[in-house]
Amino acid sequence: MKRVTGIGGIFFKCKDTEQINEWYKTHLGLETSPYGAKFDWIQDGDSAEKGYTLWSPFADKTKYFEPSTKDFMINYRVENIEALVEELKREGVTVLDEIATYDYGKFVHILDLEGNKIELFEAA
């Protein structure tokens, strides 16, 4: 079973999301929105299937990264999130929540060995 297939997003805390978005837009050319910036790409072996990686600043007071105390969180793209979560549980990995399903995909959060919160994402 494939596990991680790529980076889905890089999330980090900052004092002012509007200012940081504007700084990256002005100085590095990112096409930012209130959610950050998307980097589109084509799936390996299937030039018709598109994907993206999300770059997203979060307010420094966000609780979204908890219980981790780090200022960042990485989102990994996965295949078959349900089977992966079951395997991770059998391996003793801390799974923080139930799989959440949205129009654009499924998400679940886990902790790594050092308590870093990780977001797993399976695209719709």
Image: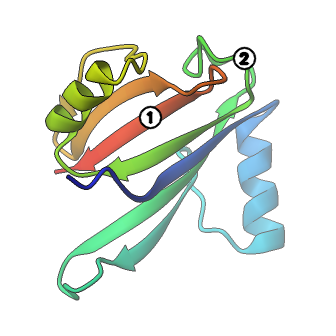
From this view, report whether residue 112 is shown above or below residue 22. Answer: above
Residue 100, can we see it? no
Residue at the spot 24% in from the left edge and 30% down from the top edge: 87
According to the picture, the residue beneath numbered tag 1 turns out to be 119
Does the residue at mark 1 contact the one at mark 2 (Cβ under 8 Å)? no
Residue 105, can we see it? yes
Location of residue 110 in the rendering, given as x and y in whole percent from the top left corner: 44, 24
Q: Is 46 or 61 nearer to us in this picture? A: 46
Location of residue 2 in the rendering, given as x and y in whole percent from the top left corner: 26, 55
Mark 2, secondary structure of its residue: loop
Pointer 2: residues within 10 angstroms few (<14), some, or many (20+)?
few
Tag shown at residue 69:
2
Location of residue 26 in the rendering, given as x and y in whole percent from the top left corner: 80, 68
Residue at the spot 27% in from the left edge and 74% down from the top edge: 50
From this view, report whether residue 35 is shown above or below residue 30. Answer: above
Location of residue 11 in the rendering, given as x and y in whole percent from the top left corner: 61, 41
Residue at the spot 18% in from the left edge and 31% down from the top edge: 101
